[in-house]
Image (cartoon, helix red, strand yellow):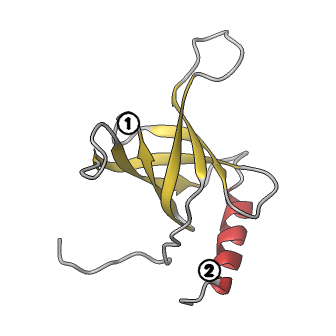
């Protein structure tokens, strides 16, 4: 690591509830697969950092539902696990970074617009 941050967007320290489908349902079944409930540590236009109670596979592409404060409906996104590590402050928990993908049928456009508005309202912008 060089110590430089090459992100294109600011991270917003927003705590929100997240639901991640970490295992798909069996073929032919109705309903979700195995869903992990977790919390964001921060979010950006292109990703989010979450704390989970179980590990996720780096590289996995997963369905994500995010409930941001002040929004009436959750955002349904598709994200790829870019990294994960054990949470040193909470034994048994994991921290993972997700890249939000531009997937057909997702709420990515609404997500980006909502975060842009939050970023503009933030005291650090």
Farthest-out residue, left: 1
What residue is at 52 percent from the left and 49 percent from the top? 39
Left-right relation of 53 to 48: left
Name the residue that disc number 2 marks: 119
- Where's the N terminus, which quadrant? bottom left
> Up-down: is 66 above or below 15?
above
Left-right relation of 95 to 110: left
In the rendering, at what x and y percent does residue 37 appear? Answer: 55, 37
Name the residue that disc number 1 marks: 56
Farthest-out residue, front: 90
What residue is at 42 percent from the left and 38 percent from the top? 60
Closer to the camera in the image, 86 or 103: 86
Q: Secondary structure at mark 1?
A: loop
What residue is at 68 percent from the left and 62 percent from the top? 111
Q: Which label is found at residue 45?
A: none
Q: Residues within 10 Å of mark 1 (few under 14, many from 20)?
A: many
> Up-down: is 53 above or below 50?
above
Q: Secondary structure at mark 2?
A: helix
């Amino acid at each position: 690591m060089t110590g430089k941050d090459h992100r294109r967007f600011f991270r917003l320290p927003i705590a929100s509830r997240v639901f991640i489908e970490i295992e798909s349902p069996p073929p032919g079944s109705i309903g979700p697969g195995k869903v992990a409930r977790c919390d964001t540590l921060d979010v950006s236009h292109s990703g989010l950092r979450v704390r989970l109670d179980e590990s996720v596979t780096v590289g996995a592409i997963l369905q994500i539902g995010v409930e941001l404060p002040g929004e009436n409906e959750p955002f349904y996104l598709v994200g790829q696990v870019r990294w994960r590590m054990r949470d040193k402050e909470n034994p048994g928990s994991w921290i993972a970074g997700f890249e939000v993908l531009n997937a057909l049928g997702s709420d990515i456009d609404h997500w980006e617009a909502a975060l842009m508005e939050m970023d503009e309202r933030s005291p650090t912008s």
